[in-house]
Amino acid sequence: VPELPEVETVRRQLAKEIIGEEIVGIEVRQEKCFAGKRNVVKEEIVGVNRVGKYLFVEFVSGRGLAIHLKMTGRLVIDNKWYETAGHTRVVVRLASGRSLYYWDTRMFGYVRVVERIGEEIERVKNKLGSEPWKIGEGEFLAKLQKTSRKVKDVLLDQSLLAGVGNIYANDSLHVAGISPLRPARSLRVSEVGKMLVAIREVMERGLKAGGASDNSYLDAYGKKGRYQDEFVVYGKTRGQCPSCGRELKYLKVSGRGTWYCDYCQT
DNA sequence: ACCTAAACCTGGGCGC
DNA sequence: TGCGCCCAGGTTTAGG
């Protein structure tokens, strides 16, 4: 599932590949996955940016693309397989002869042509919280103390903290030694610090591994990430706690699969 | 304020 | 082998 490390991996790869390229056309194969005007010709790409799990491709004209991969989206550059693949939803043709493919089995995600991309980026920034390495410990503490919601629910709330999804929420709670069920406001200052360090650490590991390909995620070159080989607790039904060896518990929290050790996470 | 569920979709895994 | 069912979880929305 594309969370911050996955989307950032794609962003870095795309930035390297398509900045300076010119778009010569857009082919929409599935209307559901596309929105906006489709008169995208002679648009020079000057930037590839990310806010939380949202991606933005900026043109010199001030227009751009707003993209969200949701559950099963992929953005792949210059890969013949996607030319005829059944779930290729949108194709961006480039002047160099290469193409950028938006592929998505479940069609939750989208590519949207935006007339004023700078304003769109601001709009998304304003609706989302800060990112894990940008939020200060004081700001994070204040947000947690304001609510009695379960701490895992808060970690998944993009308007409070941007970029954390179910995989990294599960793993960082284990690294921090905090139960996903704790009311956010019950965390002591030291625990909030631990929590933030753990989120950053786990996301850093995810980034280093090129993201998690347990499910359908592949990077911009069509390659798997490796973080699924390093999962701490995520997805480990009847698995063992990596710290104490006890069997992990499984629950639904905020409607999401939740794996944790009720001995090590208090 | 908090919580849950449904909706958007499809493929894969499971039980029978 | 095959059919039907459930499940995965990012985001939005609706309702208790």
Image (spheres, coloured by chain):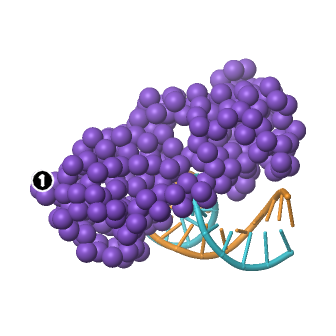
Chain colours: A purple, B orange, C cyan
Q: Is residue A171 visible?
A: no
Q: Residue at x 65, y 27 (%)?
A: A197
- Total numbered labels placed on residues in the image: 1
- In the image, taking residue A149 as reference, residue B16 lies left or right, namely left
Q: Residue at x 68, y 50 (%)?
A: A160
Work out which residue is located at the far top of the displayed protein and give it: A244
Provide residue A111's location: percent of width, then percent of height.
38, 65
- In the image, taking residue A170 as reference, residue A188 lies left or right, namely right
Q: Residues within 10 Å of mark 1 (few under 14, many from 20)?
A: few
Quadrant, the C terminus of chain A: top right
Quadrant of residue A140 in the image?
top right
Depicted A80 relative to depicted A237: above or below: below
Depicted A174 relative to depicted A39: above or below: above
Provide residue C1's location: percent of width, then percent of height.
38, 62
Q: Label 1 is placed on what type of residue? A: Ser
Q: Residue at x 12, y 53 (%)?
A: A96
- In the image, taking residue A104 as reference, residue A206 lies left or right, namely right
Q: Is residue A115 visible?
A: yes
Question: Which of the two residues, A76 or A106, is positioned nearer the viewer here?
Answer: A76
Depicted A22 relative to depicted A11: above or below: below
Residue identifier under label 1:
A96
Question: Which of the two residues, A144 or C11, is positioned nearer the viewer here?
Answer: A144
Q: Residue at x 34, y 64 (%)?
A: A63
Disc 1 element? loop
Q: Chain of mark 1?
A: A
Provide residue A125's location: percent of width, then percent of height.
55, 54
Question: Which of the two residues, A101 or B11, is positioned nearer the viewer here?
Answer: A101
Provide residue A84's location: percent of width, then percent of height.
21, 63
